[in-house]
Image: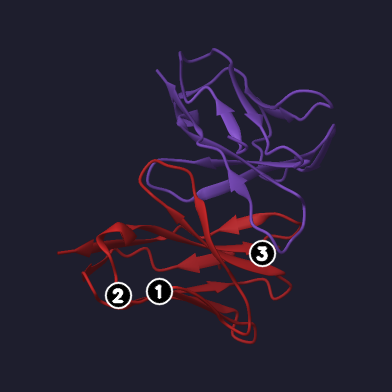
Chain colours: A red, B purple
Amino acid sequence: RKEVEQDPGPFNVPEGATVAFNCTYSNSASQSFFWYRQDCRKEPKLLMSVYSSGNEDGRFTAQLNRASQYISLLIRDSKLSDSATYLCVVNGAGGGNKLTFGTGTQLKVEL
Amino acid sequence: NAGVMQNPRHLVRRRGQEARLRCSPVKGHSHVYWYRQLPEEGLKFMVYLQKENIIDESGMPKERFSAEFPKEGPSILRIQQVVRGDSAAYFCASSLGDRDYGYTFGSGTRLTVV
């Protein structure tokens, strides 16, 4: 089983749609969780941290379920500029203090 | 710009040559990480360093690859005798070392082996 697993997509959605991404991780001892965004051929950029209580940043909502080892990201009112690859990231997934990245879910927002 | 600085942005090497990739972390960050991203694949952890120490090199290939983070100067990822399969984007990231915070990534070095 992969340490961090995501549906690769692509998700093709119309502008204004709501889209949800899911992610699972294998190591129950994992400490902290993040969503990153990566645009084509560029560096990953931190989108938001993920907490058990759930957290929201504008149109983005992230949720963590430690019991199920499951992380989600919800994007409301999608914009064309949201088109990117969304990376689920876990600290401690592979042991030690380092970030382990999922392979990413590609989102394409269309007119 | 106080971000992570990587150079060169693009590097072309012939098979058998050496590649040296440099990374200057965010000012004040003492933790440096190197990741490799092959075309159409995810980021794979290579090595985690603090000043003058390798903390975790579990992702480093056993041969030809080495990394250092000296007391003064940037972190260096060195690839000896490059092969075509080494062609990839190499990203460096830095952090304060606190698990609750993510990393700041540099723009990467795109290595092409011809």
**How far apart are the alpha carbons under marks 3 and 1?**
27 Å
| Tag 1 subunit | A
* N-term mark: 3 or 1: 1
Disc 2 packing (10 Å; few <14; some 14–19; many ≥20): few
| Mark 3 residue element | loop
Residue that carries the numbered disc 1 in the rendered image: A59
Amino acid found under the numbered disc labelled 3: Ala
- Between B91 and B25, the residue placed more toward the observer is B25
Circles 2 and 1: CB atoms closer than 8 Å: yes
Q: Position of residue A3 (x, y in %)?
A: 59, 64
Amino acid found under the numbered disc labelled 2: Asp
| Tag 3 subunit | A
Disc 1 packing (10 Å; few <14; some 14–19; many ≥20): few
Residue that carries the numbered disc 2 in the rendered image: A77
Residue occupying image coordinates x 74% and y 73%: A29
**How far apart are the alpha carbons under marks 3 and 2?**
31 Å
In the image, residue B31 sits, relative to residue A21, either above or below, namely above
Specify the label residue A111 is tagged with: none
Residue that carries the numbered disc 3 in the rendered image: A93
